[in-house]
Image (cartoon, rainbow, N blue to C red):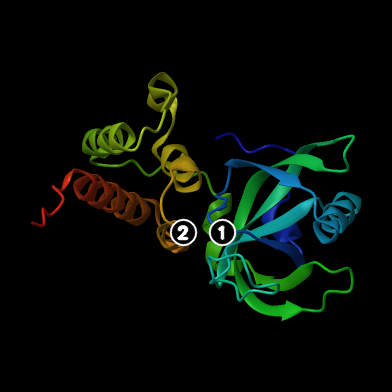
Amino acid sequence: MTRSPFLPKFSDLPDELPIFPLTAAVLMPGVQLPLNIFEPRYLAMVADALATDHLIGMIQPLDESGFEEIPEIHGVGCAGRITSYSETNDGRIVLVLTGVCRFDVRRELSAPRGYRRVSPGWERFASDFRQDETSLTDRAPFLTSLKSYASLHSVEIPWEDVEKLTDADLVNLLCAHLPLESKDKQALIETLGLLERAELMRGLMDMSSQSSIQPTEQRH
């Protein structure tokens, strides 16, 4: 994807980042993620982000139950920039985050406004700012795995649009939007290189497809 001129440069990435812990909601560079914000602490987070650099970090909690008020979080997330938003009459904010760069969590900071903040480490993911021109040597088999997965899981894929995507854009979009398990999504966003990420994704799709067509055991 062509990088928007409104996105920050790598050298401009902040030393502090508000985070939104949310299971199965992962972001990748260049990918858009719609969010519906209604909790007071996250409304405050959005207001503060809009008043500064527009950046919010998406990160998954370790506990997927959603019952913990302050859940432990994974060590890697992805920062996104608020690229559009609208206010609703019932007090919600509907926004779109566009992925900018992944980050390591160095440490958690104080939370004076109720939402959580971290000190992010950007260095390991500096490659997120470079146009990845790496090509998959096995794009056709990769698409075969995707078609099988989509068919078995009733996932609608705009195949004409897929054909126009670069390999990097395709893999990053699928990381964010395929209905994979949370732990699998986390493994994908933590995988640094495109080829390794594509190989992992294909393996996950194939395993999921195979498990879906395994005959169930009959008990008498």
Q: Residue 1: where, in percent of width, then height? A: 55, 35
Checking the image for residue 67, the label placed there is none
Element type at mark 1: loop
Q: Amino acid at mark 1?
A: Thr
Kind of residue at disc 2: Ser
Q: Nearer the viewer, residue 3 or 31?
A: 31
Q: Is residue 141 left or right of residue 169?
A: left
Q: Name the residue carrying label 1.
A: 23
Q: Position of residue 73 (x, y in %)?
A: 59, 72
Depth order, front residue of 116/199: 116
Q: Are marks 1 and 2 in contact (CB under 8 Å)?
A: yes
Q: Is residue 69 above or below residue 215?
A: below
Residue at numbered disc 2: 182
Q: Name the outermost residue toward the top.
A: 160
Above or below residue 186? Residue 98 is above
Q: Residues within 10 Å of mark 2 (few under 14, many from 20)?
A: some
In the displayed structure, 28 sits above or below 88; it is: below
Residue 156: x percent and y percent?
42, 28
Q: Secondary structure at mark 2?
A: helix
Tell me what residue is drawn at x 8 percent, y 56 percent: 220
